């Protein structure tokens, strides 16, 4: 079972990164609180507790997804990958991706990409001075922009294996934004031996949760599209999927992991 870890203390408002408004909740800071981080404010904690009233297993799922992401990154690092692009990185909580992979090889490079200016402001304050870690403001819907910039700004070498982490992002990409083409563009650029670590909100989730979350977020930047396993699998048919395949993230983890009303499926793909 995942331990129920309380969120960290509220960050000192006097030390807020430029461009961050501590009076308004932010989804990345809410997630940071659910993970036990300290880079959040009282307004974020209040929203998190309202979410927990509706879906009490939200905090548990946040930790399950985090463990899956770190496990996928560890698989890639142990296979020799030393370059990681974390798209939709959010605000880091320890253990973080860069801590995990740099523990295996201190020379590993990590690019923390997010399209939210609030997240970027936090990451720039927290990560910019760390060796091998590059925060970046960019949008996954523009893969060519990310590919160009990670080469120029972080010296990512696509002639060598790269691991792309896309956790908690794909279900925010609508069909008309062509998610399959985004994945295909990254696959085209990746060298053999590269990895793709991802999650997606599944239509196997509780129907009431799907209906409520879809209605509340309709037309906003937080709009979610729950897809079937078969539909998501098509996006990654050019990758070899590692066992246990595209399954709820709980099935990737050891131990007695609980089921949750929101089902997030995850996979680790390798380019051969």
Image (cartoon, rainbow, N blue to C red):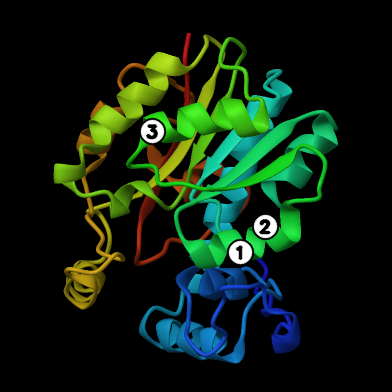
Front residue of 18/260: it is 18
Which residue is the site of mark 3? 143
Q: CA distance from mark 1 to mark 3?
A: 21 Å
Task: Describe the element under mark 3 as helix, strand or loop.
Answer: helix
Q: Quadrant of residue 233?
A: top left
Q: In the drawing, does residue 31 fall left or right of residue 188? A: right
Q: CA distance from mark 3 to mark 2?
A: 21 Å
| Residue 94 is at least partly visible in this image | no
**Residue at the spot 22% in from the left edge and 47% down from the top edge:** 227
Marks 3 and 2 in Cβ contact (< 8 Å): no
Marks 1 and 3 in Cβ contact (< 8 Å): no
Disc 3: CA contacts within 10 A as few (<14), some (14-19) or many (>=20): some
**Residue at the spot 72% in from the left edge and 32% down from the top edge:** 109
Pointer 3 or 2: first along the chain:
2
Q: What is the tally of numbered marks visible in this picture?
A: 3
Which residue is the site of mark 1? 121
Q: Which mark is residue 100?
A: none
Q: Provide residue 236's location: percent of width, then percent of height.
A: 33, 26
Marks 2 and 1 in Cβ contact (< 8 Å): yes
Pointer 1 or 3: first along the chain:
1
Which residue is the site of mark 2? 124
Disc 1: CA contacts within 10 A as few (<14), some (14-19) or many (>=20): some
**Residue at the spot 65% in from the left edge and 58% down from the top edge:** 123
Q: Quadrant of residue 19?
A: bottom right
Note whether 156 is above or below 259 in the view shown: above
Disc 2: CA contacts within 10 A as few (<14), some (14-19) or many (>=20): some
Q: Provide residue 45's location: percent of width, then percent of height.
A: 56, 86
Query: Quarter of the image containing the N terminus?
Result: bottom right
Q: CA distance from mark 2 to mark 1?
A: 5 Å
Front residue of 53/225: it is 225
Note whether 157 is above or below 11 in the view shown: above
């Amino acid at each position: 079972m995942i331990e129920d870890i309380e969120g960290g203390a509220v960050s000192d408002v006097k030390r807020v990164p430029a461009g961050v408004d501590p009076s308004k909740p932010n989804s990345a800071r809410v997630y940071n609180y659910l993970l036990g981080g300290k880079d959040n404010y009282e307004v974020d904690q209040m929203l998190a507790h309202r979410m927990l009233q509706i879906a009490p297993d939200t905090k548990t799922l946040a930790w399950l997804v985090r463990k899956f992401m770190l496990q996928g990154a560890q698989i890639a690092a142990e296979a020799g990958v030393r370059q990681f692009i974390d798209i939709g990185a959010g605000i880091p909580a320890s253990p973080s991706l860069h801590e995990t992979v740099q523990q295996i090889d201190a020379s590993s490079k990590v690019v923390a990409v997010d399209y939210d200016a609030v997240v970027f402001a936090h990451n720039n304050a927290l990560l910019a001075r760390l060796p091998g870690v590059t925060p970046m403001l960019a949008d996954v819907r523009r893969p060519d922009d990310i590919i160009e910039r990670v080469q120029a700004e972080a010296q990512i070498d696509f002639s060598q294996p790269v691991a792309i982490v896309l956790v908690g992002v794909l279900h925010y990409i609508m069909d008309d934004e062509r998610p399959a083409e985004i994945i295909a563009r990254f696959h085209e650029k990746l060298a053999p031996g590269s990895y793709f670590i991802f999650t997606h909100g599944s239509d196997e989730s509780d129907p009431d949760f799907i209906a409520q979350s879809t209605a509340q977020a309709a037309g906003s930047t937080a709009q979610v599209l729950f897809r079937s396993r078969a539909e998501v699998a098509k996006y990654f048919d050019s990758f070899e999927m590692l066992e246990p395949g595209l399954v709820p993230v709980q099935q990737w983890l050891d131990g007695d992991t609980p089921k949750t009303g929101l089902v997030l499926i995850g996979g680790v793909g390798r380019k051969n």
